[in-house]
């Protein structure tokens, strides 16, 4: 979506300081009636400097943006919050969407906050916590016997027949608009534009959205530079990265988009939120990486699992597997010299670790079993100090 930015803009025109959520950037968003917004606080998530975690990868200026602190515990709430306003502005009666889990649980949460009915299509193998969220918020949950891609196609067909508001990623342009707000927050919180932003990528809507946010800031004359975008994917779900590498290899001009082909893959990654056969916003994601001068990296699932305790122990932030993929990818990019030690880097933590406890337990190890007496507990804690 393109905007006609107002002429003769006073300093700070783009921030409504009376709001502590994404709608503080209403001047840059496609919404008119904020009385229709969810009362839940979406966005304005913390940006933490993480020196100890950064040092482990040789990065001296690392920041984590913890979007696990949104109402439904993922980055998807940014998209859902804007989509909800749009749905209500158009008088929609039912919200609908297909999801690997988080987009749906976000829509269900936001729908519940304003009392709207919500229908979500998920693959039946979505993690239990995400299904629990959907059901708890009162959505009608259709657990599709198939993949996310099957759920997506089914949702498209049913929305078409029933005339429901369809939030689907890549189909609904308002999701990208919501997601771009993370870029505005990063700029406000850091006070400048970072050198790199690392984004875990499946459909490509987050990386495309965040990139658009930085581009909007530049186009509106608020900043004069943009960061490089780092697309982090699992080796087991790497359609966008493969397209980026192919384009970089052929050396074609990034404006020559008709040469970009995104070949479908058979995704098998355990990071369910980024397990995608056919990226629904793939072209825009490839553009984000190439136009920003960024890079795409892929990591094995073992590195994704390993990144969960690294982030948790190095910075106190608990990420679900997809979110940890950003850190795993960034570590690799730093190791290979793509991201230099003194660059300011923001790593997006897109979802809370409690969303997939089973994966976290695989990475976390076991507790120390101890008999219920003091001597046993003292013996078990020998060498820990005190
Ligand atoms: C959806 C999601 C992603 C990936 O976003 P895309 O737009 O599909 O690339 C990453 N992490 C989490 C936690 C998500 O829910």
Image (tube, grey):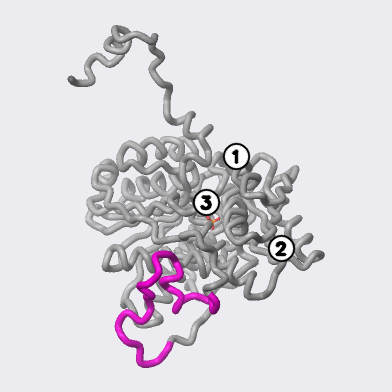
Between the residue at mark 1 and the residue at mark 2, the CA separation in whole angstroms equals 25 Å
Instruction: Indicate the secondary structure of the residue bearing disc 1.
Output: loop
Percent from the top left, x then y, of residue 351?
Answer: 48, 48
Q: Is 124 above or below relative to 289?
A: above
Q: Is 224 above or below relative to 82?
A: below
Is 154 magenta? The answer is: no
Question: Which of the two labelled residues, at mark 2 and mark 3, occupies the earlier sequence position?
Answer: 3
Give the magenta range: 6-33
**Number of numbered tags placed on the structure image:** 3
Residue that carries the numbered disc 2 in the rendered image: 94
Q: Is residue 235 visible?
A: yes
Q: Write the residue at 27% across / 55% down.
A: 340
Q: Is residue 246 visible?
A: no
Q: Nearer the viewer, residue 271 or 336?
A: 271
Q: Nearer the viewer, residue 98 or 270?
A: 98
Percent from the top left, x then y, of residue 43?
Answer: 44, 60
Work out which residue is located at the far right of the displayed protein and give it: 161
User: Which circle marks residue 247 in the picture?
Assistant: none
Percent from the top left, x then y, of residue 60?
Answer: 22, 51
User: Which circle marks residue 127 in the picture?
Assistant: 1
Residue that carries the numbered disc 3 in the rendered image: 72
Between the residue at mark 2 and the residue at mark 3, the CA separation in whole angstroms equals 19 Å
Q: Write the residue at 31% across / 77% down.
A: 224
């Amino acid at each position: 979506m393109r905007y006609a930015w107002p002429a003769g803009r006073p300093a700070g025109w783009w921030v409504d300081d009376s709001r502590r959520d994404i709608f503080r950037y209403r001047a840059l968003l496609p919404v008119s009636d904020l009385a229709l917004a969810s009362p839940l606080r979406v966005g304005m998530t913390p940006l933490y400097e993480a020196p100890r975690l950064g040092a482990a990868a040789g990065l001296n200026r690392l920041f984590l943006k913890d979007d696990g602190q949104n109402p439904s515990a993922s980055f998807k709430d940014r998209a859902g919050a804007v989509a909800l306003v749009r749905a209500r502005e158009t008088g929609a009666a039912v919200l609908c969407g297909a999801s690997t889990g988080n987009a749906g649980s976000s829509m269900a949460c936001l729908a519940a906050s304003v009392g709207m009915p919500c229908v979500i299509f998920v693959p039946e193998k979505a993690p239990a916590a995400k299904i629990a969220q959907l059901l708890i918020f009162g959505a009608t949950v259709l657990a599709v016997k198939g993949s996310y891609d099957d759920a997506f196609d089914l949702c498209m067909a049913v929305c078409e027949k029933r005339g429901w508001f369809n939030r689907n990623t890549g189909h609904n342009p308002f999701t990208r608009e919501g997601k771009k707000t993370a870029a505005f927050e990063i700029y406000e919180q850091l006070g400048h534009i970072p050198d790199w932003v690392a984004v875990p990528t499946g459909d490509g809507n987050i990386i495309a959205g965040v990139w658009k946010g930085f581009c909007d800031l530049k186009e509106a004359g608020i900043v004069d530079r943009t960061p490089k975008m780092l697309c982090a994917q699992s080796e087991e779900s790497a359609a966008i990265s493969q397209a980026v590498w192919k384009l970089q290899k052929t050396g074609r001009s990034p404006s020559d988009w008709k040469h970009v082909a995104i070949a479908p893959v058979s995704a098998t990654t355990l990071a369910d939120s980024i397990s995608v056969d056919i990226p629904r916003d793939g072209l825009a994601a490839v553009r984000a990486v190439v136009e920003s001068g960024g890079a795409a990296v892929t990591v094995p699932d073992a590195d994704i699992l390993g990144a969960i305790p690294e982030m948790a122990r190095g910075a106190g932030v608990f990420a679900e597997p997809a979110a940890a993929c950003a850190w795993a990818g960034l570590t690799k990019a730093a190791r290979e010299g793509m991201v230099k030690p003194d660059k300011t880097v923001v790593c997006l933590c897109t979802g809370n670790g409690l969303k997939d406890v089973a994966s976290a337990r695989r990475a976390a190890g076991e507790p120390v079993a101890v008999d219920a007496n003091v001597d046993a507990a003292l013996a078990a804690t020998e060498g820990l100090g005190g």
